[in-house]
Amino acid sequence: METAIEVTDLVINRGKREVLHGLSCAIPRGSITGLLGPSGSGKTTLMRAVVGVQLVASGRVTVLGEPAGSPALRHKIGYLTQAPSVYDDLTVRENARYFASLYRLGAADADAALAAVGLSDAAHQLVANLSGGQRSRASLACAIVGRPEVLVLDEPTVGQDPVLRDDLWGRFRSLAAAGTTILVSSHVMDEANRCDRLLLIRDGHLIGDDTPAAIKSTAGTDDLDEAFLRIIRQQEKAAA
Amino acid sequence: MSPRTLASTIDRIVRQLRHDRRTVAMVIVVPLLLLTLLYYMFDGGPLFDRIALVMLGIFPFIIMFLITSIAMLRERTSGTLERLFTTPVGKLDLLFGYGIAFGLVAAVQAAVAAGLAYWLFDLSTAGSAWLVIVIAVANAVLGVALGLLCSAFARTEFQAVQFMPVVALPQILLCGLFVARDQMAGWLRAISDVLPLSYSVEALTEVGRHPDPTGTMWRDLGIVVGAIILALVLGAATLRRRTA
């Protein structure tokens, strides 16, 4: 399978602390890859490196054959930050239209993105007046509006209604089927089961990189949470 | 930079401001109230003419400096700037977007304030009111450019507002309004000489005294434009696509 994102020996420092310690992985094109790990493990840092806004100490990140952050990639990448990064003092539609315009797209594309995240009814509301879940969907609409080939989503479903979360995952699945490569971080193991592949990160080290089924069978359990725990224990034992 | 991205960025910034009606009202009304205060303080005499003329240049500078530094700080802290840097938007689209959007707002503000000063308060200047408005807008854009630059050195809105007295007050004290610049001690004069507001105040004074634009006025306006470009270039250097 063709590789969309390739990370080689990536080392990243934030402040004086090294947060990623020579991480390597390859993410296949047209797949949904879940990035799992506790808060502070380096998920967001890795995602920032992939979209090209993170200073890198050493190592390489290649996206669609180009170095991450190169100008040619800016038309092809969509990034959802963990905290919703939309303009509070604009309406939902004005936000979507502004981000659409940056990709040379028009009002119809902006409205389509709002419909895709179920926000058509709130299009005229100021973002400042939205609920947390709506706000993060407004932010998601701005990430998908440019129809990116690579979509990097930092915890897209936090605070969403379960029905809506299911809809959003359906949407991600159809985007992937159409060839979009999706890298998505999550805390929710139930969502991890819906990914094609999983990257398990802990303390800046990659401790697992496989399909959810393979990870579970290697760990000898049907429960991903339990599998994650067993992998950590095994590695601790090996290190000791 | 692309014309289309620049245009949509200007449109976006103006829309943001328009949704904040109270800020718009204050931007327009506060200079009018202050001018009214000045008018009654000096009974509309010659001192009013001199001070009101200078104030028409100083109000837009201060207000646009504050608005821009907070707006840019919000871009930095809300994550929108980080997201913008993953899109095809250019740094210059953002810098010029802010400069032009707030410059337009400043033009409205300056026109309304000058209108009040000339028609209601009988402000008399030897030169044209249009030149006064042009210099006021140049001052506003100077405020925008310095605000963009200073926002890079503030982490919070508390810090950002503290830059206003640091950047604006020395310039107002040393611009020649309180003590004529050629009567200042040498070292004060030297400081005054490197502060851009000194030149815009001198330009306004020239318009007050001479019926036609003078060489000094054009030179001063040129210096202010130079200061704007310098601040924008330095501001561009603080906008980093990649951060730690």
Image (cartoon, coloured by chain):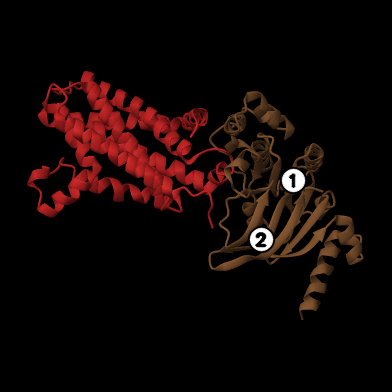
Res. B45 visible in picture: no
Q: Residue at x 92, y 66 (%)?
A: A220
Secondary structure found at label 2: loop
Mark 2 or mark 1, whichever is nearer to me: 1
Whole-percent x and y of residue B129? 22, 22
Whole-percent x and y of residue B210? 11, 25
Palette colour of chain A: brown
Find disc 2 in the rendering and name its residue.
A42
User: Chain in red?
Assistant: B
Query: Extreme top residue here?
Result: B119
Horizontal arrangement in the rendering, residue A189 relative to residue B98 (left or right)? right
Q: Amino acid at mark 1?
A: Ile
The chain ID associated with circle 1 is: A
Whole-percent x and y of residue B243? 53, 54
Secondary structure found at label 1: strand
Whole-percent x and y of residue A86? 58, 40
Horizontal arrangement in the rendering, residue A24 relative to residue A89 (left or right)? right
Find disc 1 in the rendering and name its residue.
A182
Tell me the CA gap for discs 2 and 1.
Answer: 18 Å
Q: Are marks 2 and 1 on the same chain?
A: yes
Q: Amino acid at mark 2?
A: Gly
Q: Mark 2 touching mark 1, by CB under 8 A?
A: no
Q: Is residue A168 above or below residue A52?
A: above
Query: Extreme front residue here?
Result: A65
The chain ID associated with circle 2 is: A
- Position of the C terminus of chain B, as image quadrant, is bottom right
Res. A107 visible in picture: yes
* Residue in front for this viewpoint, A65 or A106: A65
Q: Quadrant of residue A187?
A: bottom right
Q: Residue at x 49, y 44 (%)?
A: B74
Q: Is residue A84 above or below residue A112?
A: below
